[in-house]
Image (spheres, rainbow, N blue to C red):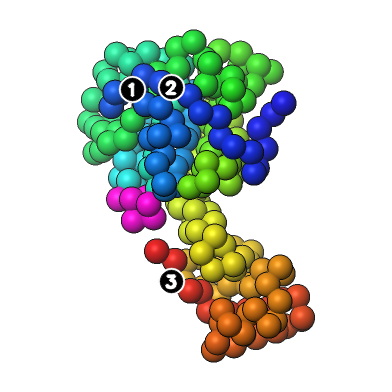
């Protein structure tokens, strides 16, 4: 059955450009992002992997590790990394999984045979410290992802986990947030002693608590 939000992210062992990884152990007690790219030595992937390297510090601030995957072998990942450094100014500074037998890609539903039966699509999984899947997105091979959006979602997920607040439409870091419906007004008084603005009993707005 296809993976869904709230499922435990399947554990696996893999060869990566930074050595062997046992996925759940590698995640440790923090957050993780697993993302697939269709193929090494392709233009859109080259820009994506370089940009992810430039964002690594932002993910680290959020206690989040990043790891890429494609079905290409390790020596290809290593050779291509030089091109990424040359053209994007950043070599991948995170592990890239070589999933040559497509075991992980199949388990995570990263191969969509009616789109392409050999390459992985552009999947992103955000995984929480409890190893559960918090977010999944799937983009076609021809569209590069917006990794700033993944950072934004990570901020939202971490605010929900720490402070029981949700984030409204088009929310950006620093803007007001919403007290989740499962928190009663009595509980909210404890959590948000400065109060909130209730536009409706179910729509309670508070300033954003510290995110990270
Ligand atoms: C790319 O990364 O540029 C790409 C990969 C597969 C199909 C189309 C584009």
Looking at the rendered image, the disc whose residue lies closer to the viewer, 1 or 3, is 1
**Where is residue 175 drawn, in percent x and y?**
51, 73
* Circle 2 residues within 10 Å: few <14, some 14–19, many ≥20: some
Please say whether residue 58 is one of the residues in the magenta stretch: yes
Q: Earlier in the sequence, mark 1 or mark 3?
A: 1
Which quadrant is home to the N terminus?
top right
Q: Is residue 74 above or below residue 193?
A: above
Question: What residue is rendered at 65% in x and 78% in y?
Answer: 187
| Image height of 145 relative to 140, above or below | below
Quadrant of residue 21 in the image? top left
Real-space Cα distance between discs 2 and 3? 35 Å
* Residue 64 among those drawn in magenta: no
Residue 155 can be seen in this image = yes
Relative to 148, 125 lies left or right: right
Q: Which mark is residue 210?
A: 3
Residue at the limit of the structure toward the top, as seen here? 101
Tell me: 10 left or right of 89: right
Local secondary structure at mark 2: strand
Quickly name the residue at label 2. Answer: 13
Please state the extent of the stretch shown in magenta in the rendering. Answer: 57-63
């Amino acid at each position: 059955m296809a993976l869904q939000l709230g499922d435990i992210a399947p554990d696996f062992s893999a060869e990566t450009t930074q050595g062997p990884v046992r996925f759940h152990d590698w995640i440790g007690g923090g957050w993780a992002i697993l993302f697939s790219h269709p193929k090494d030595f392709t233009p859109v992937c080259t820009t994506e992997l370089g940009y992810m390297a430039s964002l690594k510090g932002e993910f680290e601030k959020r206690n989040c590790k990043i790891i890429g995957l494609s079905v290409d072998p390790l020596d290809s990942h290593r050779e291509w990394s030089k091109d990424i450094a040359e053209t994007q100014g950043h070599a991948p500074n995170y592990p890239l999984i070589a999933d040559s037998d497509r075991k992980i890609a199949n388990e995570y539903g990263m191969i969509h045979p009616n789109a392409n039966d050999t390459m992985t699509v552009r999947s992103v999984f955000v995984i929480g410290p409890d190893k559960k899947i918090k977010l999944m997105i799937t983009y076609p091979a021809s569209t590069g992802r917006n990794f700033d959006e993944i950072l934004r979602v990570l901020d939202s997920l971490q605010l929900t986990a720490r402070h029981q607040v949700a984030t409204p439409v088009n929310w950006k870091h620093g803007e007001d947030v919403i007290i989740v419906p499962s928190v009663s007004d009595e509980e909210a008084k404890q959590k948000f002693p400065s109060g909130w603005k209730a536009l409706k009993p179910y729509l309670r707005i508070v300033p954003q608590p510290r995110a990270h």
